[in-house]
């Protein structure tokens, strides 16, 4: 059976949308023009995925200003600081959320997460959000004295968001957790106890929400924690094949796997036959009855035409398999 | 004893509107109103002759040449009139910005398109499509204009090879690799790309600058602290050492806005950088706006300690004024908040310098500078910041007298 294909994060904006949003930022273009172009960009991306036979359709989160913003703005107890921090080792930045009081669900609006008004009703929809561990790692906690209290409150608040998204028809939710495998911002990497806390929080986040869940790690080697990830109460476990040393693994699982097999930080569009060969090679080390091919993270790190070409390469590779 | 706390700028200034417009459109005397006002403030005595030439220029090439030289003169005079000890290159008026300005001069690189940096801010990214070569000199004409017009010593900032490669896609260099370990393949490609950048672009550029009389080259490497892995830091050191090999001029590094673990990683590797006798670093950004020379008030400067502990023996260009938007309360003795800006008081500059001196131990190793280039600030704000920078350095000298 051919693997399914999906997007796995924020897609790239078109040059036209970039030009308009820049101009809007300088006060030279009305908001209505950028909104119109954003819709056009989104529809083009939806059509692209639909035409390529993607399993779930994403709106590409083209309106998101960074990976944390929609969650940060939906929670009470968090203020948006003015400080921008580097997104891992990329040359992109996010506004660092600051925790000033107990975290709980605040002003939730579906449209801040996904443009359901633009997605076809006849298809299944996917949304990608950062999981509670990564959110806690990348925010500044000025309230909680215990990390566990913070991360569990975050998990519960995020669960409320996910429930509401599910009620709006989102059938697939990806929790991105790069901090489980890559922590360049820390001198000491997380130890076992912290990992257990993170996994437990992820478990609480998905509890009682009826969507299909996937956990996706990227930018780091997932092989040391893969067995633990496979124990999570999620449907799919995904990892970055460009960073994960799978050569020493020998794992069989009944869970679906998601291979991050096109590189969102490289402009080279992967050859579909190379994707197929690499997938086959990796499956000899870690196999499951079901497989999804995805980009290894947000495709926003490459220009739009490259991002679209990478999505096409995924679909072609799938047909070769 | 040499003058303590000499003052330098890091690199870029905002580009005046007349300079930007003039590169693509003919100018009118109305366009030059702002230039005339600043000519008086900066005492540019031949302004009227130069303006006449600009307005009379019938071809774009002549106008561009005049514009670039004139805007460079404005930058130099701004630094001189505010009292800086080094003129830099007059605020990098002849450059598009630090990445694209270089990339467009490199054969084999193609600008692919924009990607989001944050919010509605973007940057252009390029890919190596073939083995790279320098097409033409990148900074030489600017340096020649500066040399002709500067009244103070000159430092030439250039973008470092590690940053240029890190911000580009390695394309051709990746495709030549066939290791099945994808991580290894990426690193090998980056190394080859980087060393080619050093040999084919940066070293020829430095050769031209040195031959033309440059005596101090600042290598800007903001990307270096974003990859704290030892394999990446080793690459950075290798590229740096190859870059400076055989040149007998002063070299300094400027690295700002490091990742969350701050400058700790750079501090470990800085002593391995050949001929790097000066590090210009950003600190004001993470420091509070209150007076004091103790750890509590000067929390933003703690990372300096790492450099001392790791045995870096050169000078420090200490960032003592902020260069980005600022919001928050400012006690009157520490400066004033002006919409999106803070104008640090000379007393705050003084205290930051004195605290840095406490950590470093030797005041002769401390230079005074903004965190980074002031290109995002208006010239009025820049003028006020630089004037207070100079006055603050003077107060620090008096405190140690």
Image (tube, rainbow, N blue to C red):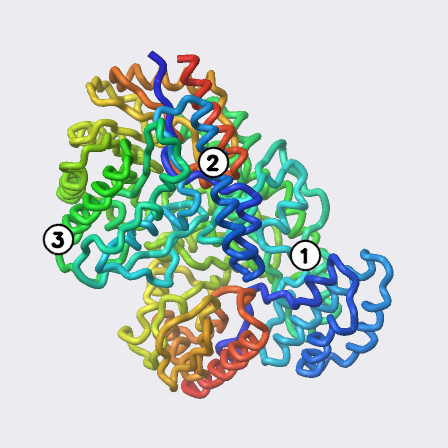
Residue A43 image label: 2
Determine whether, in the image, residue B243 is placed left or right of residue A100: right
Above or below residue A197? Residue B400 is below
- Give the class, few, some or many, for how many residues have Cα within 10 Å of label 1's Cα (few <14, many ≥20): some
Residue at the disc numbered 1: B210
For image coordinates 70% across by 67% down, the residue present is: B18
Above or below residue A69? Residue A315 is above
Distance of label 3 from label 2 (alpha carbons): 41 Å
Q: Say if mark 2 contacts mark 1, CB within 8 Å.
A: no
Element marked by disc 3: helix
Residue B304: percent from the left, percent from the top? Answer: 37, 65
- Nearest the viewer among A32 and B286 is A32
Is there one chain holding both mark 3 and mark 2? yes
In this view, the mark in front (3 or 2)? 2
Q: Which chain carries label 1?
A: B
The mark that comes first in sequence, 3 or 2, is 2
Residue at the disc numbered 3: A149
């Amino acid at each position: 059976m051919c693997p399914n294909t999906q997007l796995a994060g924020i897609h790239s904006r078109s040059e036209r949308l970039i030009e308009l949003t820049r101009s809007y930022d300088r006060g030279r273009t009305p908001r209505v023009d950028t909104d119109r172009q954003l819709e056009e960009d989104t529809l083009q991306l939806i059509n692209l995925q639909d035409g390529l036979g993607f399993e779930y359709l994403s709106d590409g989160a083209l309106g998101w200003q960074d990976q944390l913003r929609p969650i940060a703005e939906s929670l009470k107890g968090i203020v948006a600081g003015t400080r921008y921090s580097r997104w891992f080792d990329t040359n992109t930045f996010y506004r660092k959320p600051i925790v000033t009081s107990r975290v709980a669900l605040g002003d939730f609006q579906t449209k801040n997460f996904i443009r359901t008004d633009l997605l076809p009703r006849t298809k299944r929809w996917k949304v990608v959000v950062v999981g509670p561990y990564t959110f806690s790692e990348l925010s500044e906690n000025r309230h909680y004295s215990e990390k566990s209290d913070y991360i569990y409150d975050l998990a519960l608040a995020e669960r409320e968001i996910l429930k509401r998204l599910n009620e709006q028809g989102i059938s697939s939710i990806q929790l991105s957790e790069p901090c489980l495998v890559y922590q360049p911002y820390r001198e000491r990497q997380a130890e076992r106890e912290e990992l257990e806390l993170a996994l437990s929080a992820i478990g609480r986040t998905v509890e009682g929400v009826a969507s299909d869940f996937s956990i996706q790690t990227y930018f780091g080697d997932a092989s040391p924690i893969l067995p633990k990830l496979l124990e999570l109460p999620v449907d799919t476990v995904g990892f970055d094949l460009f960073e994960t040393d799978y050569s020493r693994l020998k794992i069989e699982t009944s869970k679906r796997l998601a291979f991050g097999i096109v590189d969102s930080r490289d402009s080279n569009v992967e050859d579909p036959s190379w994707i197929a060969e690499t997938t086959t090679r990796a499956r000899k080390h870690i196999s499951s009855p079901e497989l999804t091919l995805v980009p290894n993270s947000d495709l926003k790190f490459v220009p739009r035409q490259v991002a679209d070409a990478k999505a096409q390469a995924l679909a072609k590779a799938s047909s070769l398999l | 004893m040499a003058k303590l706390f000499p003052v330098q700028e890091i690199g870029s200034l905002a580009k005046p509107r007349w300079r930007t417009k003039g590169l693509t459109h003919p100018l009118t005397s109305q366009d030059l109103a702002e230039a005339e006002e600043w000519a008086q403030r900066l005492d540019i005595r031949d302004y009227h002759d130069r303006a006449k030439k600009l307005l009379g220029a019938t071809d774009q090439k002549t106008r561009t040449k005049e514009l670039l030289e004139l805007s460079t003169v404005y930058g130099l005079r701004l630094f001189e009139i505010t009292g800086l000890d080094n003129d830099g290159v007059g605020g990098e008026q002849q450059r598009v910005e630090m990445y694209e300005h270089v990339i467009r001069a490199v054969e084999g690189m193609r600008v692919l398109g924009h990607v989001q940096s944050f919010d509605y801010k973007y940057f252009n990214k390029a890919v190596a499509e073939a083995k790279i070569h320098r097409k033409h000199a990148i900074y030489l004409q600017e340096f020649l204009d500066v040399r002709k017009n500067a009244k103070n010593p000159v430092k030439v900032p250039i973008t470092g090879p590690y940053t240029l490669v890190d911000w580009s896609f390695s394309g051709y260099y990746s495709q030549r690799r066939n290791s099945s370990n994808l991580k290894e393949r990426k690193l090998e490609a980056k190394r080859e790309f980087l060393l080619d950048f050093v040999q084919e672009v940066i070293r020829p550029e430095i050769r031209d600058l040195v031959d033309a009389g440059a005596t101090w080259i600042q290598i800007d490497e903001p990307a270096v602290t974003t990859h704290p892995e030892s394999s990446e830091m080793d690459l950075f050191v290798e590229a740096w050492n190859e870059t400076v090999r055989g040149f007998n001029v002063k070299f300094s590094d400027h690295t700002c806005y490091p990742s969350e673990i701050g400058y700790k990683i750079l501090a470990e590797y800085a002593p391995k950088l050949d001929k790097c006798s000066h590090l210009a670093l950003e600190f004001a950004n993470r420091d509070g706006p209150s007076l004091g020379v103790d750890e509590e008030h000067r929390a933003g400067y703690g990372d300096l300690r790492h450099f001392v502990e790791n045995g870096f023996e050169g000078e420090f260009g200490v960032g003592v004024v902020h260069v980005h938007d600022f919001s928050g309360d400012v006690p009157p003795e520490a400066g004033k908040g002006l919409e999106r800006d803070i104008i640090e008081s000379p007393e705050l500059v003084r205290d930051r310098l004195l605290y840095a001196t406490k950590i470093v131990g030797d005041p002769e190793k401390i230079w005074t500078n903004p965190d980074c280039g002031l290109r995002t600030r208006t010239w009025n704000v820049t003028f006020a910041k630089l004037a207070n920078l100079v006055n603050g350095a003077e107060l620090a000298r008096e405190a140690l007298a």
